[in-house]
Amino acid sequence: MNDNSPPSGDNIRKFKADPDLDQAKDTAYRVTSSELRSFIERIEKLQTEKAEVGDFEKVVFAEAKSRGYDVSTIRRIIALRKKEPGQISEEQAVLEFYMEALGM
């Protein structure tokens, strides 16, 4: 018989039931379940709030457009304001280089 083989029949050791361990397992599962539910509900709430903010953003863009502003230019300015000055300069230099190469 190989020493690494599992014990057979009569040699299997049985452990007595541990009600505290069983209760801890049940509680751990419920905590995980409630925690997961909490994460999901928080994400759903944030998605709803994000959609509402998007609706407000559309209203502001519509108002700017009705006052004669070019919305696409406003969007570009907003995107540029999020970037570092060095990154903006580099992108503008590449754009000018490409435009020059195309004779524009």
Image: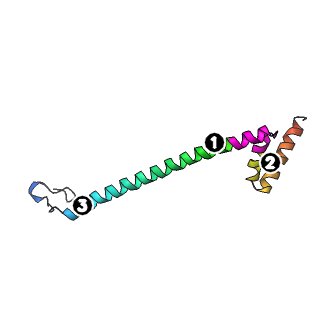
Labels 1 and 3 touching (C-beta < 8 A): no
Residue at the spot 27% in from the left edge and 62% down from the top edge:
24
Colouring chosen for the image of the structure: rainbow
- In this rendering, the label closer to the viewer, 1 or 3: 1
Closer to the N terminus: mark 2 or mark 3? 3
Q: Which residues are magenta?
A: 59-75
Whether the magenta-drawn stretch holds residue 62 is answered as yes
The x and y percentages for residue 86 are: 80, 56
Q: Is residue 43 left or right of residue 99?
A: left
The x and y percentages for residue 67 are: 80, 40
Residue at the spot 13% in from the left edge and 54% down from the top edge:
8
- In this rendering, the label closer to the viewer, 1 or 2: 1
Q: Secondary structure at mark 3?
A: helix
With respect to residue 63, does 32 lie above or below? below
Q: Picture quarter containing residue 99? A: top right
Mark 3 Cα shell of 10 Å, populated few (<14), some (14-19), many (≥20) = few
Task: Please name the residue that numbered disc 3 is placed on.
Answer: 23
Task: Please name the residue that numbered disc 1 is placed on.
Answer: 55
In the displayed orientation, state which residue is furthest to the top.
103
Residue at the spot 71% in from the left edge and 44% down from the top edge:
60
Q: Is residue 37 left or right of residue 97?
A: left
Whether the magenta-drawn stretch holds residue 72 is answered as yes
Task: Please name the residue that numbered disc 2 is placed on.
Answer: 91
Closer to the N terminus: mark 1 or mark 3? 3
